[in-house]
Amino acid sequence: MALKVSRVIRRFVHYGPLLATFIIVLVTIMTLTCIMVSTPITSFKLPNGRPSWQHHMTLGSFINMTVFLCFAILTSFHFLACMIHGPGYVKNNWKPEVKDIESKLQFCQECEGFKCPRSHHCRKCKRCVKRMDHHCPWINACVGHKNHAHFIRFLFYAASGCFYGGTNLAATVVKIIFYGSKNFIIAYYFNSLPKFVILVFSCGIAYGVSLAVGFLLVMQLRDISKNTTSIESWIIRKAEWRHSHLGTTFTYPYHLGSRWNNLTQVINMSNFAKGDGYTWPVVPGTDQYTFTEEQIQQKLLKRQRMVDHVITGPYVTNWFSRLTLANPLLFCVCNGLDEQYIAVNKGDKVLVSRWRKRWLYGCIKRKLKNKDGKLVEKEIGGWFPRICAMETAEQTQKKVE
Ligand SMILES: [Zn+2]
Ligand SMILES: [Zn+2]
């Protein structure tokens, strides 16, 4: 229990959840203030002679405030639930009950266990995640089997609440601009330029979040209605391409016939997706391991296309070296801030699988300590600057993504 609490606290103390909390608090306080100052008032003087007002809540304002508070509370609840429950990790050192099945599954070297069907290893969480969708920086955790239903609800209430709050804020901005002197009480609350700027800023944030989160919600619902995840959608595309070249057809095993059946796997009355995260209902003609076997074939194909490189100059994974070895202005755009990088030393051999203008993505073998403290050989992948490496194979395949 204490371990879980400390994990949730560590998950929360991160720029993503802190920024999300700031946005929720800002939009909530500003919207409640705007609804409040729009109510009828009685003016009176304080003992020190300064003017003050008593607000009288009308039924309309009460309903307005209640609706908004429901959005704010439900957004916060599902946001926290996503972090508290986590994505659902595959048990440490997990292996199938039947030994013969092991050849149909992928082995995770980092977790030192087999990956159950639909699970993927997350480098940020450093664990294998059951039915992993993506790693979300806003909750500083993965979205997976256990918190997917909460995540969808969080997106829905955040997008709706921000739109509702933004509309209240926009109405106040319009009132101040066009009827400022007539609505003296509103003008009094936002009587300086900084306060007015904060109001407009909050309105912009609310509409911006509503648009971005709404878009993500639509994307998520599209995937769930096909019973896929963001990662699986990509694997399906590659599977269709691979099978079209083989002259065969690929059947996605988890599509349960109708959009409704697929949707209810994740969105139902229970706040949790159906199943234990290890076994899944599949369509006839496929089995529990059809998709995993397809992934193994794709990885074998990828390995065949990898090109040997040798490292000619060292690279250390800190910001300074990224700035000096790669283009100082464009590296953010071409390689992203949230990617995995690897340090390389002169003479290292790397198998490169992805190419970008100034960066290469490769796998390198390293002796690393396992959980028992023993040194074992592990394969780690990541980006490093292109100018640090030279191709050793005769292939001159130069792909630029
Ligand atoms: Zn793993
Ligand atoms: Zn993760």
Image (cartoon, grey):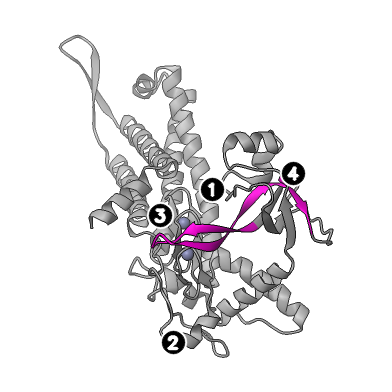
Label 4 vs 1, first from the N-terminus: 1
Q: Amino acid at mark 1?
A: Ala
In the drawing, what numbered circle is on residue 237? none
Residue position marked by numbered label 4 in the rendering: 387
Residue position marked by numbered label 2 in the rendering: 98
Residue position marked by numbered label 3 in the rendering: 154
Is ligand 1 within 8 Å of the beta carbon of the residue shown at mark 2? Answer: no
Instruction: Categorize mark 3 by other alpha carbons within 10 Å: few (<14), some (14-19), many (20+).
Output: many
Q: Amino acid at mark 3?
A: Phe
Q: Dividing the image into 4 quarters, which one contains the N terminus?
A: bottom left
Question: Which contiguous range is marked in magenta?
Answer: 363-392
| Viewer-proximal residue among 263 and 174 | 263
Q: Amino acid at mark 4?
A: Ile
Label 2 vs 4, first from the N-terminus: 2
Residue 123 coordinates in the image, percent (x, y): 50, 56
Q: Dividing the image into 4 quarters, which one contains the C terminus?
A: bottom right
Q: Amino acid at mark 2?
A: Val
Label 4 vs 3, first from the N-terminus: 3
